[in-house]
Image (tube, rainbow, N blue to C red):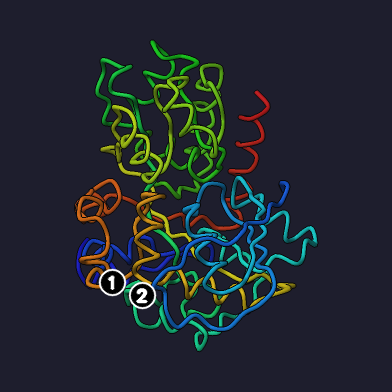
């Protein structure tokens, strides 16, 4: 499926159009913790940031912002930052549904934007406060099905789910999910990690079995559960936050993970990130402002700030996830080696075999039961 057909594809109310961004991104380009406060740093060329004061309370995935960006933002805007981190979209959802208030900015994956919006847990984005985004956002990241009116969110990063392995610590060169499972249960038992994420683990197992990433067929899900339960005794860790360092340190030799982490590992150690031949997941993470935000002006200021191409290039150079900015806005600013890195900006032929997470609420319940049994096994 290529061209206009991609744009006409639609998904369930939980789905997002990872795939609908394919032609453009290929052309355009990737529980609570203790909060900490950052000090100011050096200045930057970011422009047109809306005025804001006070402190930005930022609830995000860990290690998902270039450490240089925090002090630059504080210096340029005067706004300080307090950070909390979550380990999965479901942890974020539970925190907000449990009544947590006061966070100004969050970064859910597309499908979770829809869930939080439906639960009345998001505040509308004020585009008048985002001149950099209005200018630099690639249009293919507007009007996505999880937020068709661009009311609740704006894209932060995009990427894929696959696996990464240390080429110096493994003699095999796996390219499929089947090989990932076989090697994990065989010569590399207790040296492999999987993500602490229901969609990624269950969905990837379904794809390995020849089914859709979003299958809701109970028989197919039972087969996936059996595969995961057979895999469980061989898993070193279930983690979305520590596997990158585990690979770098050599504690793990192979991990189910995201393309940015794979590229980051490969930048430090002999490693390769794989989008498996059977297929897998394409995702978009988005900025959103939760209900109860203490300082929404600071949230808008941050979003606008990182949509400056200079700052966004710093972000991509750190996270190794694809930028949603227009490619011509990044040319001459972003490192050309990153712009042409197909782990960061996957080729269209790679994206065409991937699916977004578009599981219905009923399918989610079925997956939740599988995940509970898998983690407790």
**Is residue 46 shown left or right of residue 74?**
left
The one nearer the camera, 178 or 98, is: 98
Residue indicated by mark 2: 137
Percent from the top left, x then y, of residue 83? 65, 55
Q: Residues within 10 Å of mark 1 (few under 14, many from 20)?
A: many
Residue indicated by mark 1: 326
Residues at discs 2 and 1 in contact (Cβ within 8 Å): yes
Name of the residue lying farthest toward the top: 187
**Is residue 338 shown left or right of residue 133?**
left
Percent from the top left, x then y, of residue 168? 29, 19
Task: Tell me the SS state at disc 2.
Answer: loop
Residue at image coords 42%, 68%: 44
Number of residue marks: 2
The quadrant of the image that shows the C terminus is: top right
The quadrant of the image that shows the N terminus is: bottom left
Splitting the image into 4 quarters, where does residue 7 fall?
A: bottom left
Name of the residue lying farthest toward the right: 99
Q: Identify whether 13 is placed above or below 240.
A: below
Residue at image coords 64%, 58%: 59
**Is residue 345 shown left or right of residue 106?**
left
The one nearer the camera, 199 or 329, is: 329
The one nearer the camera, 107 or 148, is: 107
Name of the residue lying farthest toward the bottom: 128
**Is residue 102 shown left or right of residue 236?**
right
Q: Identify whether 136 is placed above or below 359.
A: below
Residue at image coords 61%, 37%: 371
The one nearer the camera, 337 or 274, is: 337
Task: Tell me the SS state at disc 1.
Answer: loop
Q: Give the Cα separation between the discs numbered 2 and 1.
A: 6 Å
């Amino acid at each position: 499926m290529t061209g206009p057909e991609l744009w006409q594809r639609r998904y369930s109310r939980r789905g997002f159009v990872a795939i609908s961004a394919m032609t453009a991104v290929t052309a355009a380009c990737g529980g609570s913790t203790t909060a900490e406060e950052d000090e100011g740093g050096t200045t930057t060329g970011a422009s047109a940031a809306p005025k804001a004061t006070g402190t930005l309370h930022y609830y995000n995935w860990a290690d998902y912002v270039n450490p240089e960006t925090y002090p630059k933002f504080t210096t340029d805007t005067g706004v300080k930052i307090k950070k909390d981190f979550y380990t999965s979209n479901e942890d974020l959802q539970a925190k907000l549904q449990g009544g947590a208030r006061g966070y100004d900015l969050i970064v859910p994956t597309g499908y979770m934007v829809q869930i939080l919006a439906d639960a009345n847990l998001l505040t509308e984005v004020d585009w008048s406060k985002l001149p950099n985004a209005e200018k630099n956002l690639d249009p293919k990241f507007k009007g996505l099905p999880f937020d068709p009116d661009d009311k609740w969110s704006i894209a932060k990063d995009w990427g894929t789910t696959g696996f990464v392995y240390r080429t110096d610590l493994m003699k095999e060169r796996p390219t499929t999910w089947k090989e990932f499972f076989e090697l994990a249960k065989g010569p590399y038992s207790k040296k492999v990690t999987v993500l602490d994420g229901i969609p990624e683990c269950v969905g990837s197992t379904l794809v390995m079995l020849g089914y859709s990433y979003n299958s809701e067929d109970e028989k197919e899900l039972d087969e996936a559960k059996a595969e995961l339960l057979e895999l469980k005794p061989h898993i070193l860790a279930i983690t979305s936050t520590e596997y990158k360092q585990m690979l770098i340190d050599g504690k793990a030799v192979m991990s189910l993970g995201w393309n940015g982490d794979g590229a980051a590992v490969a930048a430090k150690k002999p490693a390769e990130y794989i989008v498996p031949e059977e297929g897998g997941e394409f995702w978009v993470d988005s900025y959103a402002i939760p209900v109860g935000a203490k300082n929404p002006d600071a949230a808008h200021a941050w979003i606008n700030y990182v949509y400056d191409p200079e700052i966004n290039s710093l972000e991509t150079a750190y996270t190794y996830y694809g930028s949603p900015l227009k490619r011509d806005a990044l040319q001459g600013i972003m490192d050309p080696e990153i712009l042409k890195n197909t782990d960061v900006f996957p080729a269209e032929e790679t994206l065409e075999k991937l699916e977004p997470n578009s599981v219905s609420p009923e399918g989610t319940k079925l997956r939740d039961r599988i995940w509970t049994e898998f983690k407790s096994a």
